[in-house]
């Protein structure tokens, strides 16, 4: 069987994402990349923690942040993590249509999250005049949260591109690893967000 | 001399090493000719570490030489297949444990010295001098807050006393280094202040360097530490406090010079008292060892400097051609009369022509 | 291309499907716990619970959540993830060192 | 043979071949040529530095230019010469040593190379557009954030782009080594070079992200008005130092570890003995890598971190001497009892031991935190790191090139010329850098454009400059050797050193583009040696002869990297004029478009059929 062939339940490897050498390489390489990303975000978190006191005036974390919005955003992103788990569940059962559907839900949730983040930034800038340039805290805040937002955007584009590309031809051993690592990426984005809402918003509110 | 090190000194190896190293460099510049508490402490630490290193190196080289002499492939023996040794537990333990011991021997005095040099226990005590040091592109400012005086380029300290330095920078990072009496410490812009101390054993003029890359004239950012006896130091403080910026100079040209100076230069420079901070305080200028840290103190050089500081110290903050050459000469006359204290005049900068 | 797939008997298929369902159940449970932790975390801050323990508690909650994500959602608990774990822990160690530094000696 | 075929195909085809290649052996050539070129540029900059410092108060070049010179010398040598040359060796050797047909991600391999090259080119363009970066290779803020002109912007963009390439390369080698080893090649049977590449790649994976972040912050500060390092708005300049050194210290082990691995292979080959204490060597390599992450602040002893932090970092740093010492002694005992054959490769390796030991020992002296108050930012430090870098990395590269040249190009480098190049370089090296330790202690800070008359520094500096000229002569002889060998030497055997122990010596020099006709079966450490001792000719295959799957060539890595290059200019100049945003969008468009193409277009590779292989075997390729 060539990797091009569409999978059907009769001829299914247990882990389609790891059934080929290419798949195993992608799988491992992507995980290693996430190991590196951990350090990348740690550097950003470190910088943020070192600078979150340098507010140059009114716009302190306590003053700025509202928790309602962040709570909703968190719920959206957490749920999107679950929906992408569902997508992978259906991938392992070789149900391509259901996989696509759950990925679609994931994308929708991700978009809502991103929209709210954009609104949040807009709000800070226009209501409080709190920008990237106002203080070292401002720079650190927008950089950390913005890097995460950038990851969300990239993740969404990636998943959408995969969905469109494979819409017609279904699941095979060539694209299964791609779907799998895209979903790993999506989970990792959620992992980072857990630390962002804890360190930036909650701890910021506590002061 | 601190006790345990004194004993080591008498050992042959240390004696020989000390002799060898102190042969290097020039008095009052070289870190190898220590003339103060810090530099001596560090010199001793260097000696210990060098001794350890020589010991290690000799062993490595002995094995190395033996192996290379003994085990070269000889003509006609190309077919021999040597025994494929896998390793040797005992040997491996030895060359793990011995270095660990040697490193401990080095680590203990290192940690001691590190804490010793960071000691600030007497700072702020009655009679203990603290000087605020500010690094600027490319000059040094020294404020004696308690005495309400400030100088530039040359810091006066009493001998055999700890003088604390509170250090900052106004623009970029610099590093304050006086090899012959202490180590170095960075001066950093912003909220961070570093503290170190100087303690010179002998009177003298000690060369100081900026050791952190800070722009084109980084290599021209010299300063002097002038150590004088405590009595002379008190005299100097008094002299400096008595400087009257308004005092009329003696000669006619110098008087015009003063006027020109007040009109053109006072926005950045100060004469006596507290400093404006943009440019050096020129209070006791005529007593300087060097102009701007590098030029010999002659009128010619001074005029050159006033007209074209950019050619002498590329990138420095003082504008070129503020005044004409003639005016500069008059200002120079004035500045060279600013001799309000002769403390330290008898000390000469050590310098050997090669 | 390495090819490990071949037709499998129906009962095997059924077995795997069941396994997947089993795993999915665990994951939904994990999700529930994560939501719970999040609510606790936000609740503690909104209702201004005693602020002495609050920061360590928040951090612990976050770490546990993240462990759930990694081990359940991202399957690190499954086999074949040894090297993955090595690299993730390596990254986490460097990350921890970095953050400790930035919260301790930056302002000395 | 690919080169022979290429010659018949004409220049255009060859260039196209190299632009699109995903073959690790050709990528190795690309890395070698570009890294070698940057080494010459960096060396030329070093010569200019040395000429400026030849005598007191010299004005050969201006102060500003001098700062550009040292910055570009350091940056070029570390990022654009040493790293790529190491990657050249890694690419050429690792897949062969583990019995693989290629790396795990051939496409990414090529992408990594082109990113590095375009990053390096971008950085060097700065010479012609109004000034190179001038804040030192360490680029400390706020000197860098306030540096006028665009020099530092080039530094930021150039390193960001080439750094991305390095990170990709690192991940690639990690996966290659984990997933692609031939049957029987367990971790504890991997040659030490492969082992050290594995550890190095891990270091790359964890160290480079810190640099990435540092460069982003620097870019935001300089180009978009953020305030990370701007104390006026509450920023903190020390953050840069930490980020830089969290990357920077592991980086120096990234440089040295692969060459430690290469030396291990070379010593054992030319002593005709297995490596003494193999498992201790592996352990020491891992330990060095591990400790390498806990010591970065030893570059910041004078920053004012306080005595506690200074002491911790001092002791941690000293600890690295232990695993490194284990290595030194294991090498010595590998030679002990052996049959040492003094080839040029061996000569460089032999010279490495005392040279590196001196450098390591001055490193331990620097690690004594308090004493570093005297050493820091003086020529003592310059002496230290050139001893480890030139005496370790450069010697190692010369040794590796001599050793693996036949595997890369099918010809043994001329031995006579090889030794002739060695001596002036070796003598010049010690002349240049030994005296610098003393200069430093006598009061010569580093990065000094001039030193003054009467400071007692003139003689030492003159000696140092003379040494540098000797090194240049050595380098030039080495270049001559390359040309001479290409023209005059005859084709090399599969195992030109006769005592080859590892898998790469089991296949022809240079190997066919699929490397192994049949994947070999590994039966022990030093697999080829094992077979030789059993009286066999070559390796036993682990699989029947069959079709081989190979990846397809692609131009996309080149276009992706070209896009970043264009966007790089856009970012640098949009500060002056928003019209340059066009370049940003065009460049990013090219990059993202190429990435999308890659993602959406299936690339399933191609097969080399059994019949072709049989044909090759008949011609003697398979052996
Ligand atoms: C390949 C590169 C490389 C390597 C391998 C090393 C190896 C080491 N380095 Fe070096 N270092 C640099 C490259 C390197 N360094 C560079 C580029 C800089 C300057 C950057 C800049 O500022 O621009 C620098 C700067 C630098 C500093 C900062 C100095 C300063 O700026 O003030 C310090 C301080 O601790 C240091 C220490 C060490 C130590 C302890 C080792 C150890 O790993 C050495 C270990 C080896 C040995 C010790 C020898 C063999 C061992 C034995 C034979 C066993 C027995 C030995 C003993 C018991 C001592 N290095
Ligand atoms: C891999 C790293 C590496 C290598 C190999 C070298 C190699 C050399 N370095 Fe390097 N050096 C650094 C890394 C390296 N350096 C770093 C990181 C710094 C710190 C920078 C900073 O402060 O920011 C530094 C700083 C530095 C200084 C200190 C500058 C200062 O502080 O003011 C000096 C001074 O002597 C110096 C000299 C040399 C010399 C003489 C060589 C020689 O070994 C070079 C030998 C090679 C040649 C001589 C090439 C010969 C070829 C030709 C001449 C032919 C040219 C032809 C064509 C172009 C066609 N280097
Ligand atoms: Cu100030 Cu260098
Ligand atoms: Cu280091």
Image: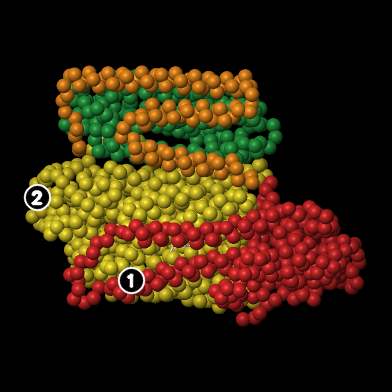
Q: Secondary structure at mark 2?
A: helix
Q: Chain of mark 2?
A: D
Q: Chain of mark 1?
A: B
Q: Colour of chain B?
A: red
Q: Which mark is residue B246?
A: none
x, y (%) of residue B205? 73, 71
Q: Colour of chain D?
A: yellow
Q: Report the coloring of the rendering.
A: by chain
Classify residue C68 by image quadrant: top left
Colour green belongs to chain? A
Q: Nearer the viewer, residue A207 or D31?
A: A207
Number of residues whose C-alpha sits closer than 10 Å to that of mark 2, classed few (under 14), some (14–19) or many (20 or more): some
**How many numbered discs?**
2
Q: Residue at left 53%, top 19%?
A: C39
Question: In the rendered image, which residue does mark 1 sit on?
Answer: B67
Locate the C terminus of chain D by quadrant: bottom left
Q: Residue at left 43%, top 31%?
A: A188
x, y (%) of residue D36? 37, 61
Discs 2 and 1 carry the same chain letter? no
Q: Nearer the viewer, residue B39 or D563?
A: B39
Query: Could one spot residue D58 in this view of the protein?
Result: no
Residue reaching furthest to the bottom: B354
Q: Colour of chain C?
A: orange
Query: Could one spot residue D314 in this view of the protein?
Result: yes
Question: In the rendered image, which residue does mark 2 sit on?
Answer: D614
Classify residue B6 by image quadrant: bottom right
x, y (%) of residue B87? 31, 59
Is residue D179 toward the left or the right of residue D247 in the image?
A: left
């Amino acid at each position: 069987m060539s990797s091009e062939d569409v999978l059907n339940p009769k001829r299914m490897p247990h882990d389609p994402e790891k059934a080929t050498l290419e798949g195993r390489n992608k799988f491992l390489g992507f995980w290693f990349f996430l190991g590196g990303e951990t350090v990348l975000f740690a550097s950003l978190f470190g910088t943020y923690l070192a600078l979150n006191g340098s507010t140059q005036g009114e716009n302190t974390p306590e003053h700025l942040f509202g928790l309602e919005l962040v709570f909703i955003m968190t719920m959206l992103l957490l749920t999107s993590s679950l929906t992408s788990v569902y997508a992978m569940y259906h991938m392992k059962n070789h149900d391509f249509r259901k996989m696509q559907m759950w990925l679609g839900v994931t994308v929708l949730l991700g978009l809502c999250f991103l929209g709210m983040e954009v609104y949040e930034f807009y709000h800070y800038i226009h209501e409080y005049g709190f920008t990237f340039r106002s203080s070292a805290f401002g720079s650190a805040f927008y950089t950390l949260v913005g890097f995460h937002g950038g990851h969300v955007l990239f993740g969404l584009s990636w998943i959408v591109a995969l969905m469109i590309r494979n819409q017609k031809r279904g699941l095979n051993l060539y694209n299964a690893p791609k779907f799998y690592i895209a979903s790993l990426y999506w989970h990792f984005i959620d992992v980072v967000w857990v630390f962002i809402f804890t360190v930036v918003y909650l701890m910021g509110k506590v002061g | 001399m601190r006790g345990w090190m004194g004993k080591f000194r008498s050992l042959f190896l240390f004696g020989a090493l000390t002799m060898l190293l102190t042969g290097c460099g020039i008095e009052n510049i070289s870190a190898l000719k220590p003339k103060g508490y810090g530099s001596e402490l560090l010199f001793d630490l260097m000696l210990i570490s060098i001794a350890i290193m020589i010991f290690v190196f000799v062993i490595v080289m002995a094995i190395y030489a033996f192996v290379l002499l003994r085990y070269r492939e000889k003509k006609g023996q190309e077919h021999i297949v040597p025994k494929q040794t896998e390793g040797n537990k005992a040997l491996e333990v030895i060359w793990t444990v011995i270095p660990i011991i040697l490193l401990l021997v080095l680590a203990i005095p290192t940690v001691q010295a590190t804490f010793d040099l960071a000691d600030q226990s007497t700072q702020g005590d009655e009679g203990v001098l603290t000087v605020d040091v500010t690094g600027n592109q490319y000059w040094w400012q020294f404020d004696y807050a308690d005495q309400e005086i400030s100088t530039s380029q040359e810091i006066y300290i009493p001998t055999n006393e700890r003088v604390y330095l509170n250090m900052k920078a106004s623009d970029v990072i610099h590093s304050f280094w006086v090899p012959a009496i202490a180590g170095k410490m960075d001066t950093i812009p912003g909220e961070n202040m570093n503290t170190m101390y100087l303690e010179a054993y002998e009177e003298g003029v000690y060369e100081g360097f900026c050791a952190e890359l800070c722009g084109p004239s980084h290599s021209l950012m010299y300063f002097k530490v002038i150590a004088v006896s405590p009595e002379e130091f008190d005299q100097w403080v008094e002299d400096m406090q008595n400087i009257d910026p308004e005092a009329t100079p003696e000669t006619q040209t110098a008087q015009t010079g003063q006027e020109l100076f007040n009109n053109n230069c006072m926005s950045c420079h100060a004469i006596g008292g507290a400093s404006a901070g943009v440019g050096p305080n020129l209070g006791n200028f005529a007593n300087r060892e060097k102009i701007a840290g590098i030029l010999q103190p002659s009128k010619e050089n001074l005029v050159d400097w006033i007209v074209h500081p950019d050619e002498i110290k590329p990138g420095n903050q003082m504008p070129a051609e503020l005044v004409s050459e003639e005016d500069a000469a008059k200002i120079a006359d004035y500045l060279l009369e600013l001799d309000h204290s002769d403390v330290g005049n008898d000390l000469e900068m050590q310098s050997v022509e090669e | 291309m390495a090819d490990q797939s071949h037709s499998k008997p129906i009962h095997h298929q059924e077995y795997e499907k069941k396994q997947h369902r089993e795993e999915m159940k665990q994951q939904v449970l994990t999700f529930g716990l994560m939501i719970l932790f999040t609510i606790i975390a936000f609740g503690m801050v909104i209702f201004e619970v005693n602020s002495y323990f609050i920061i360590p508690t928040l951090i612990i909650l976050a770490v546990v959540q993240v462990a759930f994500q990694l081990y359940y959602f991202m399957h690190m608990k499954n086999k074949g993830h040894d090297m993955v774990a090595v690299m993730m822990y390596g990254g986490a160690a460097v990350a921890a060192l970095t953050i400790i530094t930035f919260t301790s000696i930056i302002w000395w | 043979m690919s080169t022979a075929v290429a010659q018949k195909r004409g220049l255009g085809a060859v260039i196209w071949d190299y632009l699109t290649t995903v073959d690790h052996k050709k990528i190795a050539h690309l890395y070698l040529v570009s890294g070698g070129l940057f080494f010459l540029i960096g060396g030329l900059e070093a010569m200019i530095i040395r000429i400026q410092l030849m005598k007191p108060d010299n004005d050969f070049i201006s102060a500003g230019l001098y700062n550009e010179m040292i910055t570009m010398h350091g940056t070029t040598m570390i990022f654009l010469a040493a790293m790529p040359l190491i990657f050249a060796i890694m690419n050429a050797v690792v897949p062969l040593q583990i019995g693989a047909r290629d790396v795990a991600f051939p496409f990414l391999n090529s992408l990594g190379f082109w990113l590095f090259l375009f990053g390096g080119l971008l950085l060097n363009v700065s010479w012609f557009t109004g000034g190179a970066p001038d804040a030192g290779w360490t680029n400390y803020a706020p000197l860098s954030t306030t540096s006028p002109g665009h020099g530092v912007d080039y530094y930021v963009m150039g390193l960001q782009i080439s750094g991305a390439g390095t990170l990709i390369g690192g991940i690639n080698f990690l996966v290659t080594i984990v997933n692609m080893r031939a049957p029987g090649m367990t971790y504890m049977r991997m040659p030490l070079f492969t082992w050290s590449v594995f550890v190095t790649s891990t270091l790359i994976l964890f160290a480079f992200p810190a640099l990435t972040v540092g460069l982003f912050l620097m870019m935001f500060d300089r180009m978009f008005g953020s305030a990370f390092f701007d104390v006026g708005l509450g920023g903190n300049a020390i953050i840069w130092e930490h980020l830089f050194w969290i990357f920077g210290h592991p980086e120096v082990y990234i440089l040295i570890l692969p060459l430690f691995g290469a030396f291990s292979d070379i010593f054992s080959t030319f002593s005709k003995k297995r490596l003494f204490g193999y498992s201790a060597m592996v352990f020491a390599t891992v330990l060095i890598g591990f400790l390498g992450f806990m010591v970065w602040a030893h570059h910041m002893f004078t920053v004012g971190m306080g005595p506690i932090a200074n002491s911790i970092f001092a002791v941690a740093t000293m600890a690295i001497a232990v695993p490194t010492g284990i290595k030194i002694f294991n090498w010595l005992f590998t030679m002990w009892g052996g049959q040492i054959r003094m080839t040029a490769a061996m000569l460089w390796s032999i010279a490495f031991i005392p040279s590196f030991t001196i450098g390591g020992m001055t490193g331990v002296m620097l690690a004594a935190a308090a004493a570093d108050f005297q050493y820091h930012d003086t020529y003592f430090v310059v002496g230290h790191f050139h001893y480890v870098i030139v005496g370790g990395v450069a010697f190692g590269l010369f040794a590796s090139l001599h050793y693996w040249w036949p595997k890369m190009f099918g010809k043994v480098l001329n031995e006579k010329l090889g030794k002739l190049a060695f001596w002036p370089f070796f003598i010049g090296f010690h002349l240049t850098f030994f005296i610098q330790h003393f200069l430093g202690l006598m009061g010569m800070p580093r990065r000094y454009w001039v030193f003054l008359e009467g400071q007692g520094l003139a003689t030492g500096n003159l000696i140092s400059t003379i040494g540098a000229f000797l090194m240049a002569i050595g380098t030039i002889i080495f270049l001559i050797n390359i040309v001479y060998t290409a023209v005059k030497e005859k084709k090399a055997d599969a195992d030109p050193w006769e005592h080859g122990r590892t898998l790469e010596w089991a296949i022809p020099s240079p190997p066919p583009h699929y490397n192994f006709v049949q994947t070999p079966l590994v039966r022990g450490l030093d697999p080829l040696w094992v077979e030789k001792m059993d009286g066999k000719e070559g390796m036993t295959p682990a699989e029947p002869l069959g079709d081989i799957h190979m990846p397809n060539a692609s131009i996309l890595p080149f276009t992706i990297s070209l896009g970043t290059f264009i966007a790089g200019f856009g970012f640098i100049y949009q500060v002056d004029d928003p019209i340059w945003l066009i370049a940003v969008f065009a460049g990013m468009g090219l990059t993202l478009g190429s990435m999308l193409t890659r993602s959406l277009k299936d690339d399933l590779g191609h097969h080399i059929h059994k019949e072709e292989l049989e044909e090759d075997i008949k011609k003697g390729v398979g052996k």
